[in-house]
């Protein structure tokens, strides 16, 4: 029954939702008072027309209205109980109540039709007023279900209009028309009231939903805010831990750098004495056995120095502190010098060492000659080490040349033992060799190729190996270089190298605190034709420089009383008044990255790291001193 009277004119909004439920609730909440009012009016009509209407009809009608009134009250009571317990979900009592309201309208229509007394004008007017009051008073009560209201007002008023028309005469005709017009007014009023009520309820429920949503959002926001606060606290704690970890890592890195620097210095200082003494011993008269012993000791010392250099290079690469130079150098000359230098090592194993240089190779390239030398010397010494017979061939080929750039492929091929394919992928890893067993025939730390790989990658190149067991190996790298024009500085250096041959002339001040290194360096310098004075520390060096005029100073850096850096800076301040600059060359066991720059910033002119080789020292001094021939 209820579904029949529901209004579907709101574009689907009137389907069972909170607004519709609220409209039904409004109708039933006012059901008690409206039912009572209607029953009171029914008695009023009964009393008004009892004298002019047959008693049987009137009594039957009143009994019907009484029964409807009782059933309406029962339905309302049932609804209120169920609404509290279950909510409004079309229970039977709601449908019964709506049906009884409709039936009430039917009984009012019957009353108007059958209880309209012909000729009794007073009773007729009373019936008209009661019918008007019943329909008008139902507007606020039944307008929420306006279809029900339409039926409720039309059931009594349309029969009333009909009976008025039926009486005839202008007065009754006017009253009939007024009743019809009254019906339209009531319908319009109910429609407007229902629409206003619907809009108000809809706005209220939207607002309630919005408030609920805002409340939920507020609770969620508060929850999120608490989570953010907790997360912020956790992040602060994590940041604090990260800062501590970073500080600890930086402290560990500084400690490692200091340890490596001290280790390098402490090892290089005695190594300088060992290798220097062996070089001096080679210049004396030795029998064949003694000469072999000296060569063996010198070779072992150089192997130990090579291991030290590999460890330092590996540490610098791991700490991302390795910096590459970008200066002009001759790869042709570098490869030729290495072939000459390592010829004796290859010859001792009856292995031929051959260099093939592409004629198209430019004379000068821009790069780091020291690191390029390290790559080549590692390839070549490994090839000699693992080759028992045959040859080692060094090839430098030009793959492409465009404008001012050139792509090179550098190969070192040997006829040695070769490398199994499954071992090749691990060759360029740290501390790895082709044979890692403890009884391996060939020694080494396994760092050389790992360092070479990193250097080649830092130079933007590629590196690899091609090998078969028993068929030899080819280690290669491909590098891209900028071509450098021949500069006046390069020509001048070449001229200086040519002039550096022959005995040197000059008075040298050697500043060195180690007695062994004093002896070794003094003998080397004297053998080059130089006069040497000694100073044990920077303070005595300044005193000596104040008394005599020297042609060059060889300055150690780490010394007691006054170190080499402080002594150099103090002397440069004094020297600025004289105008002529005295060459000061650092000769130090400090060989870490940045030590050379530190020496130059202190005012020194050049740098050579210990252990000092006689040939390298001779070449360096030849740049700063005149020779006897010149």
Image: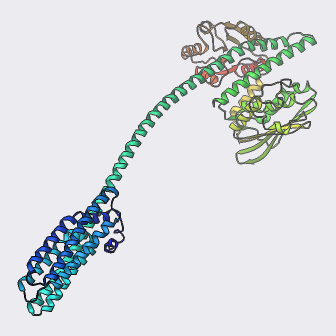
Q: Is residue 623 left or right of residue 182?
A: right
How many numbered tags mark residues here? Answer: 0
Q: Nearer the viewer, residue 549 or 296?
A: 296
Q: Is residue 279 left or right of residue 104?
A: right
Q: Give the residue furthest to the bottom.
A: 169
Q: Give the residue furthest to the left.
A: 122
Q: Where is residue 526, by image quadrant? A: top right
Residue 192 in the image: x percent, y percent? 22, 72
The answer to whether residue 378 shows anywhere in this view is yes
Residue 360 in the image: x percent, y percent? 80, 44
Q: Nearer the viewer, residue 62 or 39?
A: 62
Residue 231 in the image: x percent, y percent? 45, 37
Q: Is residue 306 left or right of residue 254?
A: right
Residue 291, placed above or below residue 421: above
Q: Is residue 121 left or right of residue 280?
A: left
Kindly identify the residue that appears in the image at 68 percent across and 11 percent down.
510
Kindly identify the residue that appears in the image at 36 percent across and 70 percent down.
12
The answer to whether residue 355 shows anywhere in this view is no
Residue 513 in the image: x percent, y percent? 67, 8
Q: Nearer the viewer, residue 11 or 47?
A: 47
Q: Where is residue 525, by image quadrant? A: top right
Q: Where is residue 614, by image quadrant? A: top right
Residue 317, placed above or below residue 553: below
Q: Nearer the viewer, residue 110 or 7?
A: 110
Q: Quadrant of the N terminus?
A: bottom left
Kindly identify the residue that appears in the image at 78 percent across and 12 percent down.
274
């Amino acid at each position: 029954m209820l579904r029949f009277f529901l209004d579907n004119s709101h574009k689907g909004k009137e389907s069972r939702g909170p607004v519709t439920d609220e409209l039904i609730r409004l109708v039933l909440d006012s059901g008690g008072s409206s039912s009572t009012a209607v029953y009171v009016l029914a008695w009023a009509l009964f009393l008004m027309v009892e004298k002019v209407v047959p008693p049987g009809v009137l009594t039957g009608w009143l009994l019907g209205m009484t029964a409807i009134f009782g059933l309406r009250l029962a339905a309302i009571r049932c609804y209120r109980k169920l609404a509290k317990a279950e909510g409004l979900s079309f229970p039977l009592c709601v449908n019964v109540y709506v049906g009884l309201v409709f039936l009430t309208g039917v009984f009012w229509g019957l009353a108007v039709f059958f209880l309209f007394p012909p000729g009794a004008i007073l009773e007729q007017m009373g019936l008209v007023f009661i019918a008007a009051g019943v329909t008008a008073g139902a507007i606020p009560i039944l307008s929420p279900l306006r279809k029900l209201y339409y039926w409720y007002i039309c059931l009594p008023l349309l029969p009333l209009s009909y009976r008025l028309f039926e009486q005839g005469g202008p007065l009754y005709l006017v009253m009939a028309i007024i009743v019809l017009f009254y019906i339209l007014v009531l319908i319009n009023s109910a429609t407007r009231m229902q629409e206003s009520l619907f809009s108000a309820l809809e706005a209220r429920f939207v607002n309630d939903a919005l408030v609920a949503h805002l409340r939920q959002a507020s609770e969620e926001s508060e929850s999120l805010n608490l989570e953010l606060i907790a997360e912020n606290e956790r992040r602060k704690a994590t940041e604090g831990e990260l800062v501590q970890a970073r500080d600890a890592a930086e402290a560990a890195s500084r400690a490692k750098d200091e340890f490596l620097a001290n280790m390098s210095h402490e090892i290089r200082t005695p190594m300088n004495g060992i290798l220097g003494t062996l070089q001096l011993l080679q210049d004396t008269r030795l029998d064949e056995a003694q000469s072999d012993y000296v060569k063996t000791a010198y070779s072992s010392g150089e192997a130990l120095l090579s291991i030290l250099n590999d460890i330092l290079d590996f540490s610098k690469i791991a700490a991302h502190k390795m910096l590459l130079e970008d200066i002009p150098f001759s790869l042709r000359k570098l490869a030729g010098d290495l072939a000459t230098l390592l010829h004796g090592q290859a010859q001792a194993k009856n292995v031929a060492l051959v260099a093939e240089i592409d004629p198209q190779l430019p004379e000068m390239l821009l790069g780091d000659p020291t690191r390029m030398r390290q790559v080549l010397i590692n390839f070549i010494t490994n090839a000699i080490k693992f080759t028992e017979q045959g040859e080692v061939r060094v090839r430098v080929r030009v793959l492409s040349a465009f404008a001012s750039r050139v792509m090179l492929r550098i190969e070192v091929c040997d006829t040695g033992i070769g490398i199994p394919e499954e071992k090749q992928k691990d060759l360029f890893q740290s501390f790895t060799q082709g044979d890692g067993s403890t009884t391996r025939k060939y020694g080494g730390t396994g760092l050389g190729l790992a360092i070479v790989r990193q250097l080649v990658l830092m130079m933007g190149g590629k590196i690899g190996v091609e090998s078969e067991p028993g068929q030899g190996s080819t280690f290669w790298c491909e590098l891209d270089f900028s071509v450098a024009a021949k500069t006046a500085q390069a020509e001048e250096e070449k001229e200086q190298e040519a002039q550096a041959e022959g005995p040197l002339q000059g008075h040298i001040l050697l500043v060195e605190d180690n007695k062994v290194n004093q002896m070794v360096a003094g003998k080397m310098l004297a053998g080059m034709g130089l006069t040497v004075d000694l100073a044990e520390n920077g303070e005595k060096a300044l005193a000596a420089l104040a008394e005599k005029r020297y042609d060059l100073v060889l300055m150690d850096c780490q010394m007691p009383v006054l170190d080499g850096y402080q002594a150099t800076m103090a002397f440069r301040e004094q020297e600025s008044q004289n105008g002529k600059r005295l060459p000061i060359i650092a000769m130090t066991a400090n060989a870490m990255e940045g030590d050379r720059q530190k020496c130059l910033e202190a005012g020194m002119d050049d740098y050579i790291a210990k252990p000092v080789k006689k040939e390298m020292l001779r070449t360096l001094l030849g740049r700063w001193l005149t020779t006897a021939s010149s």
